[in-house]
Image (cartoon, rainbow, N blue to C red):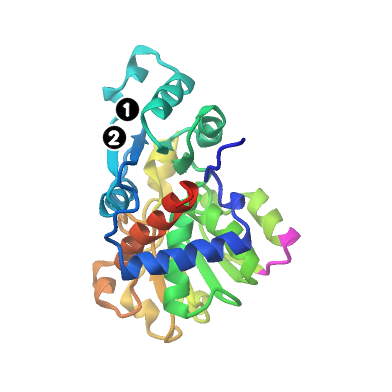
């Protein structure tokens, strides 16, 4: 029997997405339960994380489970030359489920193939981040009352932004329209443009963040330019502060517009925006606990 894992958002059908979102809403109503009593979840973070790691750990703790793992790969046997395969096989002897973040694209898929317990991809390089997508979808549905027929404007690092790539795939079930705003150096990769075309998803591309380009958006999805993805720091310096969202830009946007951001932010959202009623990124991060509770319980058949 193959073990169920969540490696890519493409692992979920439209029906499964909606089922997980319904489950997340129930956990928001009652996040403290004993469903995971006696279960051990391993969090293996080979790359830094604040929100993802802490929200997974909060999700497990609030449901009565126990956490083992590490948040610094330099403290593991990987520094002695242990392979990812051996690490995963060993950890799956100790835990009922593995949550892993790794800087190498494809690492999570590989881990799921050698593990004897379910694996959740908590981010693999610039590739995928499916539980972030689930909390994004939950936040969109919660603020808009629906997922269908929305205009979503994505801004910033669309080249390396794994949250962007996953969200495009997930929203393909719900008849979206996209606007992609990025400098040439960080534009959306061709494979995702091709994905949109194959799924008849209308999209436009811009290099300027201005009032006109966000005027009809329902969701404004801001992203950080990720220094850690650049091999050439000169290229990073050229684009690091390319966009900053300020309150003035939001004056003529739709009343229902909500601003999302997978966080952390650097300079791409001005601190003044935090007090704008359209800012939703901190609540979005909180929603991560409920979405991850739903994913964990689903994979464990609970």
One can see residue 289 in this view: yes
- Above-or-below relation of 230 to 37: above
Q: Which mark is residue 300?
A: none
Q: Residue at point 48% right, 53% down?
A: 298
- Above-or-below relation of 208 to 114: below
Q: Is residue 201 magenta?
A: yes
In this rendering, would 189 be left or right of 140? right
In the picture of the structure, the residue carrying the numbered disc 1 is 73
- Quarter holding residue 228: top left
Which tag, 2 or 1, sits closer to the chain's start? 2
Q: Residue at point 56% right, 52% down?
A: 9
Cα–Cα gap, marks 2 and 1: 14 Å
In the picture of the structure, the residue carrying the numbered disc 2 is 68
Q: Is residue 126 magenta?
A: no
Which quarter of the figure is the N terminus placed in?
A: top right
Mark 2 element type? strand
Closest to the observer, 233 or 192 = 192
Residue 103, percent from left and from top: 44, 35
Residue 41, percent from left and from top: 35, 39
- Above-or-below relation of 9 to 75: below
Closest to the observer, 161 or 7 = 7
In this rendering, would 176 be left or right of 239? right
Question: Which class describes the residues within 10 Å of circle 2: few (<14), some (14-19), or many (20+)?
Answer: some
Residue 89, percent from left and from top: 46, 23
Magenta stretch, residue numbers: 197-202
């Amino acid at each position: 029997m193959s073990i169920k894992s969540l490696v890519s958002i493409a692992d979920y059908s439209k029906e499964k997405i909606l089922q997980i979102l319904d489950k997340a809403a129930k956990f928001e109503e009652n996040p403290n339960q004993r469903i995971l009593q006696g279960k051990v979840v391993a969090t293996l973070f080979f790359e830094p994380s604040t929100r993802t790691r802490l929200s997974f750990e909060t999700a497990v703790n609030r449901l009565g489970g126990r956490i083992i793992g590490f948040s610094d790969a330099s403290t593991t046997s990987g520094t002695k030359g242990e392979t990812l395969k051996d690490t995963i096989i060993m950890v799956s002897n100790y835990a009922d489920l593995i949550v892993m973040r790794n800087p190498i694209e494809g690492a999570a898929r590989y881990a799921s193939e050698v593990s004897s317990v379910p694996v959740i991809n908590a981010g693999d390089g610039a590739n995928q981040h499916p539980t972030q997508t689930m909390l994004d979808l939950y936040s969109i549905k919660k603020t808009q009352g629906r997922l269908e027929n929305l205009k979503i404007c994505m801004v910033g690092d669309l080249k390396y932004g794994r949250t962007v790539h996953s969200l495009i795939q997930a929203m393909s079930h719900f008849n979206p329209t996209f606007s992609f705003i990025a400098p040439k150096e960080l534009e959306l990769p061709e494979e995702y443009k091709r994905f949109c075309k194959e799924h008849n998803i209308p999209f436009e591309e811009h290099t300027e963040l201005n009032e006109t380009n966000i005027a009809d958006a329902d969701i404004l999805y801001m992203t950080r330019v990720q220094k850690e993805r650049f091999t050439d720091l000169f290229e990073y310096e050229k684009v690091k502060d390319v966009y900053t969202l300020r309150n003035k830009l939001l004056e003529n946007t739709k009343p229902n517009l909500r601003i999302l951001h997978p966080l952390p932010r650097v300079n791409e959202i001005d601190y003044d925006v935090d007090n704008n009623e359209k800012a939703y990124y901190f609540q979005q991060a909180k929603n991560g606990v409920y979405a991850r509770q739903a994913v964990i319980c689903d994979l464990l058949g609970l």
